[in-house]
Structures are given as structure tokens and as C-alpha cells.
Image (cartoon, helix red, strand yellow):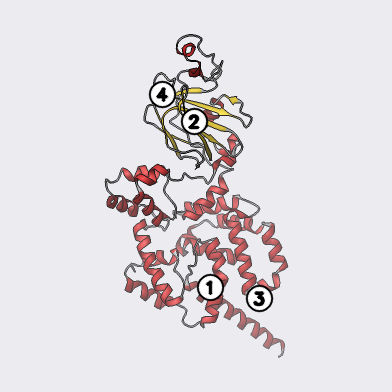
Amino acid sequence: MFVNWINTVLQGRFGLTKYAEIPAADKTALIAKIWQDPTIQANFTNNYGNLAAGNITAVANMLNIIGTTMNGGGNDPTIAVDYYDMIQTSGLQLTASEQAGLSGATQAINAPVPSPFAPVAPSGYTFGQPEPKGGWSSKDPGQSFGWTNHMGTDYGTPAGERIVSPFAGTVTNVLNTPGYGNYVEVTLDNGWKIGFGHVASAAATTGSRVNPGDLIAISGANVGSAQGAVTIVTWQDPNGVYHDPAQMLDPIFKGTTFSAAGIAGAAGTGSPTVNAKLDTEYPSIKSDFTKYFGTPPSPEDVYSILQHGTDPQQWTDYIRSMTSHISGLNMGQASDLRAMADNVSMTALGHASTDGVVKDLFDQGFTSQADVKFWYDENSPNEIDKQTYNAIYKANKPVMTGILNENGGFDPRIAKAQAAQVQAKTQTIAKGATAGHE
């Protein structure tokens, strides 16, 4: 019974063909992990009678718990990692919701920390190096930050290079001082602070929230006390004590993860948000990307799109040509066909369609409004009364939302299959009762 539930869920997400291609050992291992979740076992034991009888409410509750567990909300976060890995290994694209779930499940396992700029060796003053006693610093003590020893490290960053935040946090300072010139500081949630000085300009404002990879500054040359194109990096603990930034940056340059660095909480949502400046300059890119992908683009997404056109129409065309989360369809095809399927499904059944239906329509060459209507005429469970259909739809909503990421969508073939199962079970019980009276 439990295995059948999981297999049905997996078939709905992968499709019958790709589901059959998944190694049996991988499916068995995933199901075994899910079964070991204490909440699932307790619910199964306490409600076995209702579950075995196919009670709609009991099954819906169990499916909801299974969905939560598979998407990282259970006792073992590696379940979500294995599930999402299975999806990607099968050649399918993760949905925006699944990407967010994967980020949350893996941030303490293997999420990489983005480099603030291209890995380079120190160039200029390093941490702890005595400040010069002559020259410009003696003429203007402010140029030496009031330090006896250098409390940051200068890195050779070509003027005009993008500087991104390696961590999630809050921008607490965007200052212009005689020493730093322009200075941007990000405070992590654990109180540590990373700062970037001698930058040409800030790309984040005081109080703004940033995620790893968000653009926060543009590097400069001869800014503040800098001689040449350098960026000074500072690294302070919650008490304001300066530490050697190389101890933090060197592992990042080599590809460390948040967990390995001991700062898993600094992973944030795991993906950059669009910088406010880019929102203002390219609003059509943000709106189109959000329309098709469900989430705003990262700064890197925006820069990539800009390389594929010079006007909003070309940017839209490129976004539509990007790979969708439905295998074999680009984003334009998936969006257009899903809109048609949703329209027909709402008219015929009162709810949206699903990505699985869209995939089947596309594979069969059913891409016109008439084709889609024909498919629904053939697959709608006309033999099921409306009350029973709505009960089955309601019972499946948790798994459709929690596991298949379908907000209101439903595949009518599921209702037909489940109604047939209930009918077969009823007939078996009736036969047993008849035999018992013979």
C-alpha cells in the first residue's frame, strides 16, 4: 500500500517512460528512506485501519506528510537531495519550487560559496602589515584608517569588475571615506561582517538584503588611498575584531561549501535576487523572466540575457527559447501549451491542468486548442459522478501541491485510476462477504 502510493507519486512526476528507466535499486532506496521517517511511521500505525480502507481524509493526510518529507521537511534532509537528484539524473528540469527546496535541503551539505570576484593573490598591503610611517599616511592620518597595522588585505581587481556578496546578509554601510574611498559592508546573520573598499561604486543600498551572488559593488582604480586597481577586503567578528580575510577567502577561491566553511546559515535562499539597479534598467527582462520561470532572474541571468539581444523583443525571444522544466520543451512551448491545457481543463473539470499532461500532449503532437480539447474529451472521467470526482481531486491536492508542485492542477487520469482501484477493492470485499455466508 505505502509503496504503491510512492510509486504513483513518482510516476506522476517522471511520467511512465522515465519512471521505468529509473534503476529499481534507486527507487527502493528512496522509498525505504521515506518509510523510515518517524512521522510517517506513526501516522501509518495510528491510522492503519482508515488507510487500508482507503479513507479519503486519512490518505490525503498521509500523502501530505509524504510530500513534506520528500521536499525536505522530514527527519532526514537527504531524502529531498536524493529525490531531486533522481529528477535531474532522469534528464528532467527542476521547477522553481523544487530548486528552492533543493537549495534549502543542501545548503548545509554541499552548496558552494560564490567568489566575490575572480580568484586572485593579494596585491598591496596584506593583513597585519605595518602601516607606512612616511609618505601620504603621515600627511593624512585618515588615509591609514587610524590603523597601526593593516587590518584588511588588498586584492588586485581590474577596474570595472563586478563584486558580489559571497554570503547572505544585510548591507550595513555604503560609505565614502578618505581611506577606503567607497566602502560596502555586508553583515551576516551570525554577526560577522565582510567589507569591500576602494570600489568605484556601490550597487547595494544600506539596509538592503542580499543573497550569495548578488551584485554589491563595482571595483575601481585609485579610489581613496588605493594606488592602482585594488579592492581592500575586511573580515570582522561580531565583537568588531578584525581577522585575516585570507582565512575566509582562500577556501572560497578553492571552491569550499557553506557547511565546510562552518557558516551554513549564510547560504540564504541559495540564489541571487535581482539587484535594484538592474530592475530599473531592464524591467522587461525581470517581468518576462518572472512570468516564464516563476521567480525573478539573478544578476547573472540578466547579464546572460543581455548577450542575446539588444531590445526587449529579442530578450523575450531568448527567454522563451530557454530550457523549461518540462523535458523536451523550451519555455515558450511549455508556457503556451500549459495555458491552452489550463483553459480547457478549467472549462471541462473546474481546475487547472498539470505539467505531466502538457508533456503527454507535446509528445503526441497535440499542440492546438482543438487537439487539447480532444485529449481531455478522451481522458476525462465521464463515468465518475461529479461528487466522487471532486472528493478524489480534493484528496490528491496535498500531493499535487507538495510533491508535484501543481498549485490547483490535477490530471483526470489519476481520478479514473483511483476510482477503478476503489471499485475493485469494493468488489473483492463483497465477494469475501458473500463467500463467508455460503
N-term-proximal mark, 2 vs 1 = 2
Mark 1 or 4: in front is 4
Task: Identify the residue shown where x is 47% and y is 70%.
Answer: 411
**Is label 2 in a helix, a strand or a loop?**
helix
Indicate the amino acid at tag 2: Phe
CB atoms of marks 4 and 3 within 8 Å: no
| Quadrant hosting residue 362 | bottom left
Above-or-below relation of 118 to 418: above
Between 194 and 66, the one nearer to me in the picture? 194
Indicate the amino acid at tag 4: Val
Task: Identify the residue shown where x is 50% and y is 19%.
Answer: 142
Above-or-below relation of 115 to 4: above
Above-or-below relation of 341 to 271: below
Distance, label 2 to label 3, CA atoms, is 57 Å
Indicate which disc residue 419 carries. none
Distance, label 2 to label 1, CA atoms, is 50 Å
Between 23 and 212, the one nearer to me in the picture? 212
CB atoms of marks 4 and 2 within 8 Å: no
Say which residue label 1 marks.
Answer: 393
Does the image show residue 318?
yes
Compared across the picture, whether 40 is left or right of 422 comes to right
N-term-proximal mark, 2 vs 3 = 3
Crowdedness of circle 2 by 10 Å Cα count: few (<14), some, many (20+)?
Answer: some
Indicate which disc residue 223 carries. 4
N-term-proximal mark, 1 vs 3 = 3
N-term-proximal mark, 4 vs 3 = 3
Say which residue label 3 marks.
Answer: 53
Residue extending furthest bottom? 438
